[in-house]
Amino acid sequence: MSSEYARTERTTPSRLPERATYEQNAIHAVLDEALLCHVAYVADGLPRMIPTLHVRQGHDLYLHGSTGSTLMLAAREAAVPACVSVTLVDGIVMAKSWFNHSMNYRSVIVHGEAVLVTDADEKHAAMAALMEQIARGRAEGSRYSNKREFAATAILRVPLAQSSLKQRSGQAKDDEEDLGLPHWSGVIPITTTFGEPIGVDEIELPDYLQNYARGSLD
Ligand SMILES: Cc1cc2nc3c(=O)[nH]c(=O)nc-3n(C[C@H](O)[C@H](O)[C@H](O)COP(=O)(O)OP(=O)(O)OC[C@H]3O[C@@H](n4cnc5c(N)ncnc54)[C@H](O)[C@@H]3O)c2cc1C
């Protein structure tokens, strides 16, 4: 078993806390597999949430945005308290009762201060890693950002120190008294599949995009 992130009051679910884990490898695997995240923060005293691209590097999460976005403008002033979530759904769980319906899932929630990355080398490395998060091999397989594009891109760094993974797997759990009911119960598995790549021009599909799949960056 790998090391764990700290289990704190803030990162412990009040409901079904036994489904939560703080194991670093397991949290990294979910962050690496997910294509996108949702970032929640407070603007003008009210909660906001935006979907965006992310990449994990070690024990940090990097978030991508336009320099003109509200979140990135706020981060220019000071670190932004943020909550980032990523969810992978693995199955629809149908029970005999309404109440016992559920989902099989792996979800990660990260609490932390989102800090604007100002060091050019760190920013470039994070942007290259973001390309690799999209597809392994893509950083070298496409043109680097030019000066204008680099300046128009903002990258935030959020430490993973306060993160949790909650997950459910397995069958529907019916109440004892429901077992004789005539209703179907069970799981409809969900698997993510990627279609045939559709090129813009005649350039041959590179090897690294054959059989596209997602997995860990490690
Ligand atoms: C696809 C999906 C469907 C769900 N459907 C339902 C539903 O219909 N009803 C329902 O009650 N719950 C549902 N959940 C679970 C839900 O996300 C919460 O875990 C649950 O509501 C318990 O909330 P809480 O009050 O214990 O969490 P809180 O006490 O508000 O959470 C405290 C902290 O615990 C950690 N935490 C809590 N939940 C999660 C999580 N899911 N993943 C990672 N860390 C977490 C976070 O650090 C969070 O800040 C679903 C989850 C997923 C992914």
Image (spheres, grey):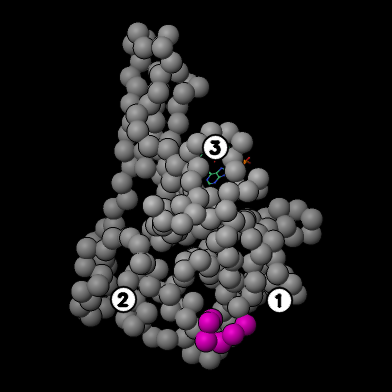
- Whole-angstrom CA distance, mark 1 to mark 3, is 36 Å
Residue lying at 33% horizontally and 42% vertically, measured from the top left: 190
Residue at the disc numbered 1:
76
- The quadrant of the rendering that contains the C terminus is bottom left
- Amino acid at circle 3: Pro
Q: How many marks?
A: 3
Decide: few, some or many residues near mark 3? Use Cα within 10 Å; few <14, some 14-19, many ≥20: few
Residue at the disc numbered 3:
17
- Residue 174 in view here: yes
**Residue 86, labelled with which disc?**
none
Q: Please tell me whether residue 210 belongs to the stretch shown in magenta.
A: no
Q: Is label 1 in a helix, a strand or a loop?
A: helix
Residue lying at 46% horizontally and 70% vertically, measured from the top left: 57
- Whole-angstrom CA distance, mark 3 to mark 2, is 38 Å
Seen from the viewer's position, the closer of residues 96 and 197 is 96
Q: Are marks 1 and 3 in contact (CB under 8 Å)?
A: no
- Residue 86 in view here: no
Where residue 93 sits: x, y (%)? 39, 31
Residue sticking out furthest to the bottom: 147
Magenta range is 118-123
- Amino acid at circle 2: Gly
Q: Is label 3 in a helix, a strand or a loop?
A: helix
- Of pointers 1 and 3, the one earlier in the residue sequence: 3
Q: Quadrant of residue 68?
A: bottom right
Residue lying at 35% horizontally and 33% vertically, measured from the top left: 170
Q: In the image, 181: left or right of 205?
A: right
Where residue 188 sits: x, y (%)? 32, 34
Residue at the disc numbered 2:
137
Where residue 133 sits: x, y (%)? 40, 68
